[in-house]
Amino acid sequence: MIRNFLFFCTVGVLLSACVTAPKGPEHAVNLTAQLHNIAQVQQWQMRGKIAFRQGKEAASLNLVWKNDSGDFDFRLTNFLGVTMVNLTVDQNKSVLEADGETYVDALPEPLIYQITGMVIPVEPLLSWVKGLPLKNDTYTLTEKGLVDTLKSGCTTCQNWQVNYGNYGRVNTAKDKEVWLPHSITLTQSAASGLPNTQLKIKIYQWTLN
């Protein structure tokens, strides 16, 4: 269950902000080079919005996510700019601050579950948000050769499907160009009788270091 301190709202409304979406490449890309280059991107920041939905419960918040080779800071704020959730992860521990409380665990997944009731595969997600499939994932491509849909294949993150949209060109720190998604929808099929989990991410800005 999504904790009630989050700002509850209609997901579709808050994710339809007036931000010009990138149109993607005009010509087909070299998929091998694309996947190689985004795999090299280990330091990045994204800004946008994220919406959670589980059954009839929904929440939508502003998102700032900074990643440095797996150590990251994931911050959610409401429309007034007030921090609602801040998750900091490094090699030693994970710390989540929410609703005036601080939670600590060796891994981030238990903390996310404690707050939202959702099981989120954090490590695979660090690749998935870039449009990068993992070894055992299956995926389809757009007509321009970018990852369009992805189904998880790892044993700890089963039943997740990722849909991508609105790829935009971003320059890496090594002056290489990569195409990164600006619209991501992640859906986990639940067991019979239970509601599916859905995450929608709208990314307004990628910054690569």
Image (cartoon, rainbow, N blue to C red):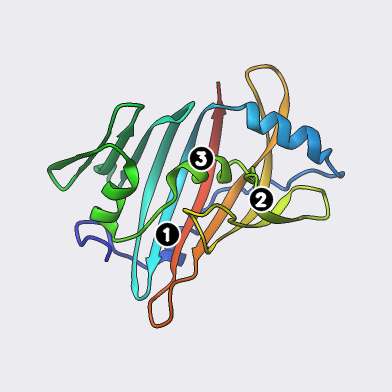
Residue 5 in picture, x, y percent from top left = 19, 57
Of pointers 3 and 2, the one earlier in the residue sequence: 3
SS type, badge 3: helix
Q: Residue at x 51, y 64 (%)?
A: 187
Q: Residues within 10 Å of mark 3 (few under 14, many from 20)?
A: some
Left or right side of 176 for 120: left
From the viewer's perspective, is residue 68 above or below residue 95?
above
Residue depth check, mark 1 versus mark 3: number of the one nearer the observer: 3
What residue is shown with label 2? Answer: 166
Residue at the extreme left of the image, as rendered: 100
Name the amino acid, label 2. Asn
Left or right side of 128 for 17: left
User: CA gap, disc 2 to disc 1?
Assistant: 18 Å
In depth, the one of 183 and 80 nearer the eye is: 183
User: CA gap, disc 3 to disc 2?
Assistant: 18 Å
Image disc number at residue 126: 3
